[in-house]
């Protein structure tokens, strides 16, 4: 009550104005620039406050108006995305999106990037990325049931391989150590290798949580007088200005920012997870939010903005890890494993008892007010006083100039027509094995064997298939989850690349027997102030929106990561699509691997001459050019719907999406999906196409399925009647048999064991052959490929 | 028959053990809290996998000193059956209730994959439902599962028939290639001399449902149940 009284007094006096603290630096144009704020933005701040901000206030604005928190350059674009459907229970704007998956259950899910931290400190950068996204999910009231990771690195071969190996190994270990300890299975994801990501790897983590629909809770600060509590780890000096760091380009000096990277403690996370879920179920709290990017500032202001309320926080009550921390530091710290809780008035002790049970702390640090103002005190003296609404929603947004770079226009116009096969291609198996050995295509077992994928015993289909499948206990249902994006397509044609990312994610889900339901997207791009980058961003978002509308998979949230650049330029535009689908009955679960000798192999969709942007051009010829493959969204939808029907009829034994490496690689992956029990395949193709386009072209809307020989007529008839091209191209051979593909021009005929070895050894032979020299990796020129 | 599953801070397979016990045995199953001194009159205790107390210091080291472990030790000394899986095995070794130690995998990497195990003995209370030489398929998921012990201790384990499971290939051959973590003599699971305390790195509780790929773990739960019904 004392709190409220003093507050009323302040309001009465209306003299609330942040005071400069002794020792605070003077507010100069240089200091403003260092905080990543433009002159125009600073003027806007002066207008909001009617005075010069204090140093602490400047820090608050800097964080809230950073790209990371304020979405300055992406908000107008994001508004164009479809976000609604009858099954969407929570769309964008909360900690995570939530959809209805039937039987009274709901799934919360979100993807988030930790790219810049992982570039300078791969282990902690990746680990804390997993921690943050788990908190976003369990603060909705959902128990996390799975994690996926979408990763991009430079090349594992070549001059920078040492540094890339260090980053790759560190990121994988960081993800594994964190998720394994918390006990959430890592069930899937993707890894691409390309020089464009050298020095600026992408680490996108997606978490999926499950709850009863009635347990859904949102992060909202309601009820004037309700106590605001800091929960979990004590606040330290780690990660200060992480949000601002994430909103600038990486430079040679970025290495010096390693101390900005937060340090994760998965054990505390596990305790915080259990305590938070218990808190939510207890009914003692109103709202809960992770203190993530921009820590206490963003969590408290966002919760207040959602509730249309204000907050009044006494900063000295925040439990700290070290003495003499300033309000500036406490507010902007990104110490991990902390939550901000708005409790019901008078329930503080109950909240503390639950936290104590899990050996954690909870301290009341302030109150919800009706003033609409964001007030921070230090021993009673006001150091921050900002109107809450303009702080949270007033961040200026920009529609930048977008213009495609001439270089990309030229590259897209390139045609593979005059391309001469390499001499080595006289051996028909050479290009094929080169592709299977390409780390982007090869088995990622080296990665996922470091992740516990089976804990919590729901993993029906784990890593290595088109999508992961998790059962929903107590029901006949399951969910399928995947992440997808081909950055090369997006580079050559961002609009179509965005469409393909969505279409392929949905196709992956359908191949497992799921109906695609909703999307979370992670937009990884370069510096939006560069017209060619803004063009990529706006076009990719347009493509994503278009595909999501047609495929009925609204976007329920996500993350934007800009300024992903190294001195050689921007990364490939990489709008990662995380997608969730629902499998109605466990009997429908289907995997990529062929099942039985003698089964018919059927190709759905049409082969066409689509080598542009392909893995074949890159891995075999070292060329990144041409246009991204054509995509007809309506044809894609027909394919997916009719495939899902046949799966539900029980006619399909296996289904595998055709992606990087085209038909030949998809056939190999289906044959050797079970490494210990590979099956032969014998396929004959009669298309009048150049051999490389036929075997390795990446035409869209194609799926390889297998069925019992006796079912072939009705399977083909079904697809044909739905306007989907389907034809039998071969049969499954015996266990341990041969891999044989015959085309009008050549025959690939190999023992299946050769394919198994090439595909499964590609990454281990690059990673484990010699130890990683960390000292050299750290000393090397970091950001120059 | 009543089954207890201990929850330490950081346990993360407690739920899986609990569900397996309920689903397989339809048994009355309760969670036991690390800070309590009460075993709630259970007939068998499961120490589940996870990272108890963050595995700070050494895996299982702090948990081995927790209040509940004093009761578990007394329970075992009185002949009560105790099963430690993964982190539970590490805790039992740290508590001195089983010989030897579990150190980092030879590869220095966490390994998560299905492995094959050969049943070395078919004895109550843990393996009577299996046949000697039977090959089982269980998931493993651990970073510190390399079992080590002095040579004479290993000889004694062998001589006294205390090794219940070894890593093997699908054809039951105990080979170096089939050893996922570098454990000496491919040891995957052992008991104490009295035979009532089992420690194993692979996860039987994750292999009780054909939907998830294997039902081979059911035998561990059934063996325990048979034993309890018989006594």
Image (cartoon, coloured by chain):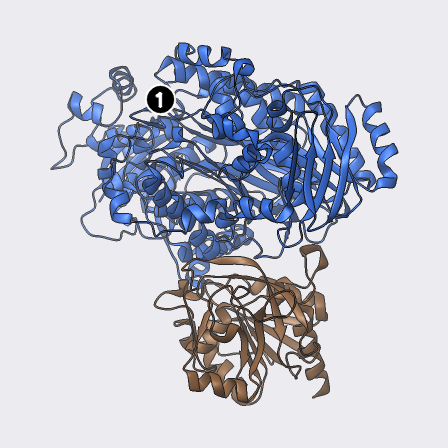
Chain colours: A blue, B brown
Vertical placement of residue A550 versus B73, above or below: above
Q: Residues within 10 Å of mark 1 (few under 14, many from 20)?
A: many
Which image quarter holds the C terminus of chain A?
top left
Apparent side of residue A493 relative to residue B55 in the rendered image (left or right): right
Chain at numbered mark 1 = A
Name which residue lies at 53% across and 28% down: A616
Residue at the disc numbered 1: A527
Residue A243 figure quarter: top left
- Residue A664 in the image: state x and y as whole percent: 63, 33
Q: Nearer the viewer, residue A416 or B53?
A: A416
Vertical placement of residue B216 versus A723, above or below: below
Apparent side of residue A536 relative to residue A468 in the rendered image (left or right): left
Name which residue lies at 41% across and 33% down: A302
Name which residue lies at 48% across and 65% down: B181
> Element under label 1?
loop
- Residue A274 in the image: state x and y as whole percent: 50, 56
Q: Which of A405 and A403 is in front in this view?
A: A405
In this orientation, does residue A95 appear?
no
- Residue A590 in the image: state x and y as whole percent: 72, 43
Q: Nearer the viewer, residue A115 or A303?
A: A115
In this orientation, does residue A384 appear?
yes
Q: Nearer the viewer, residue A520 or A88?
A: A520
- Residue A711 in the image: state x and y as whole percent: 86, 38
Q: How many marks?
A: 1
Apparent side of residue A368 relative to residue A98 in the rendered image (left or right): left
Vertical placement of residue A87 versus A443, above or below: above
Residue A99 figure quarter: top right
């Amino acid at each position: 009550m004392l709190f409220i009284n003093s507050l009323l007094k302040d309001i009465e006096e209306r003299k609330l104005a942040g005071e400069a603290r002794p020792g605070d630096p003077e507010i100069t144009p240089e200091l403003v620039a260092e905080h990543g704020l433009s002159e125009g933005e600073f003027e806007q701040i002066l207008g909001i406050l009617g005075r010069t901000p204090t140093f602490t206030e400047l820090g608050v604005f800097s964080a809230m108006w950073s790209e990371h928190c304020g979405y300055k350059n992406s908000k107008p674009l994001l508004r164009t995305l479809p976000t609604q459907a009858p099954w969407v229970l929570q769309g964008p704007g909360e900690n995570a999106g939530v959809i209805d998956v039937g039987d009274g259950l709901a799934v919360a899910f979100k993807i988030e990037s930790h790219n810049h931290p992982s570039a300078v400190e791969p282990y902690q950068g990746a680990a804390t990325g997993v921690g943050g996204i788990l908190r976003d999910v369990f603060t909705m009231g959902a128990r996390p049931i799975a994690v996926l990771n979408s990763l991009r690195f430079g090349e594992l071969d070549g001059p920078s391989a040492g540094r890339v190996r260090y980053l790759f190994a560190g990121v994988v270990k960081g993800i594994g150590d964190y998720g394994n300890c918390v006990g959430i299975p890592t069930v899937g994801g993707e890894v691409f290798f390309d020089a464009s990501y050298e020095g600026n790897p992408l680490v996108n983590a997606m978490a999926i949580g499950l709850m009863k629909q009635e347990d859904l809770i949102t992060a909202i600060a309601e009820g004037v007088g309700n106590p605001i509590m800091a929960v979990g780890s004590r606040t330290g000096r780690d990660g200060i200005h992480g949000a601002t760091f994430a909103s600038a380009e990486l430079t040679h000096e970025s290495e010096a920012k390693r101390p900005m990277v937060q340090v994760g403690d998965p054990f505390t996370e596990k305790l915080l997870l259990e305590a938070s879920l218990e808190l939510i179920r207890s009914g003692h709290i109103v709202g809960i939010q992770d203190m993530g990017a921009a820590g206490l500032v963003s969590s408290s202001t966002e919760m207040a903005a959602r509730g249309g309320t204000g907050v009044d926080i006494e900063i000295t009550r925040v439990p700290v890890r070290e003495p003499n921390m300033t309000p500036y530091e406490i507010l902007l710290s990104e110490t991990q494993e902390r939550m901000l809780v708005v409790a019901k008035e008078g329930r503080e002790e109950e909240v503390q008892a639950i936290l104590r049970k899990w050996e954690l702390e909870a301290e009341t640090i302030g109150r919800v007010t009706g003033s609409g103002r964001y007030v921070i005190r230090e021993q009673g003296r006001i150091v921050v006083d900002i109107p809450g609404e303009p702080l949270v929603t007033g961040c200026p947004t920009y529609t930048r100039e977008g213009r495609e770079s001439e270089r990309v226009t030229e590259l897209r116009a390139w045609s593979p027509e005059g391309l001469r096969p390499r001499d080595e291609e006289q051996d028909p198996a050479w290009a094929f094995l080169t592709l299977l050995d390409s780390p982007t295509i090869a088995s990622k077992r080296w990665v996922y064997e470091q992740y516990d994928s089976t804990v919590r015993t729901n993993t029906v289909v784990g890593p290595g298939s088109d999508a992961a499948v998790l059962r929903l206990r107590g029901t006949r249902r399951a969910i399928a989850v995947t992440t997808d994006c081909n950055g090369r397509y997006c580079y050559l044609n961002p609009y179509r690349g965005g469409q393909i990312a969505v279409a392929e994610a949905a196709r992956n889900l359908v191949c497992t027997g799921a109906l695609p339901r909703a999307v979370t997207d992670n937009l990884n791009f370069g510096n939006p102030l560069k017209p060619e980058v803004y063009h990529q961003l706006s076009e990719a978002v347009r493509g994503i929106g278009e595909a999501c509308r047609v495929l009925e998979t609204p976007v329920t949230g996500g993350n934007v990561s800009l300024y992903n650049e190294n001195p050689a330029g921007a990364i490939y535009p990489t709008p990662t699509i995380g997608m969730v689908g629902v499998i109605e009955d466990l009997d429908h679960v289907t995997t990529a691997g062929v099942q039985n000798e003698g089964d018919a192999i059927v190709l759905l969709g049409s082969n066409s001459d689509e080598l542009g942007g392909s893995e074949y051009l890159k891995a075999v010829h070292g060329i990144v050019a041409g246009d991204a493959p054509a995509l007809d969204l309506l044809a894609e939808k027909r394919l997916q719907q009719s495939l899902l029907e046949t799966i539900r009829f029980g006619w399909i034994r296996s289904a595998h999406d055709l992606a990087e490496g085209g038909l030949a690689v998809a056939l190999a992956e289906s044959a050797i999906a079970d490494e210990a029990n590979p099956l032969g395949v014998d396929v004959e193709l009669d298309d009048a196409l150049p051999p490389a386009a036929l075997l390795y072209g990446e035409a869209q809307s194609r799926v390889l399925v297998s069925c019992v020989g006796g079912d072939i007529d009705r399977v083909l008839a079904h697809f044909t009647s739905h306007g989907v091209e389907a034809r039998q191209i071969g049969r499954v051979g015996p266990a341990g048999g041969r891999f044989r593909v015959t085309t009008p021009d050549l025959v690939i005929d190999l023992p299946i064991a050769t394919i198994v070895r090439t595909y499964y050894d590609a990454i281990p032979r690059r990673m484990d052959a010699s130890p990683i020299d960390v000292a050299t990796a750290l000393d090397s020129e970091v950001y120059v490929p | 028959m009543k089954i207890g599953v201990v929850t330490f801070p950081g346990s993360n397979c407690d739920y899986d053990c609990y569900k397996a016990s309920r689903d397989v045995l339809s048994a009355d199953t309760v969670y036991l809290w690390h800070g309590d001194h009460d075993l709630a009159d259970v007939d068998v205790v499961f120490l589940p996998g996870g990272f108890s107390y963050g595995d700070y210091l050494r895996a299982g080291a702090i948990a081995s000193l927790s209040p509940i472990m004093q009761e578990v030790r007394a329970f075992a000394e009185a002949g009560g059956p105790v099963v430690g899986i993964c982190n539970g095995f590490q805790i039992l070794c740290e508590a001195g209730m089983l010989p030897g130690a579990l150190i980092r995998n030879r590869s220095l990497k966490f390994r998560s994959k299905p492995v094959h195990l050969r049943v070395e003995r078919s004895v109550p209370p843990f393996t009577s439902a299996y046949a000697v030489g039977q090959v089982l398929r269980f998931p493993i998921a651990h970073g510190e599962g390399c079992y080590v012990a002095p040579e004479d201790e290993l000889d004694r384990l062998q001589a006294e028939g205390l090794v219940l499971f070894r890593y093997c290939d699908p054809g039951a051959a105990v080979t170096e290639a089939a050893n996922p973590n570098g454990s000496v003599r491919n040891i995957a699971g052992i008991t104490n001399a009295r035979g009532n305390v089992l420690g194993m790195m692979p996860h039987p509780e994750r292999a009780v449902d054909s939907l998830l790929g294997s039902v081979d773990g059911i035998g561990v739960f059934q063996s325990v149940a048979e034993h309890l019904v018989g006594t």
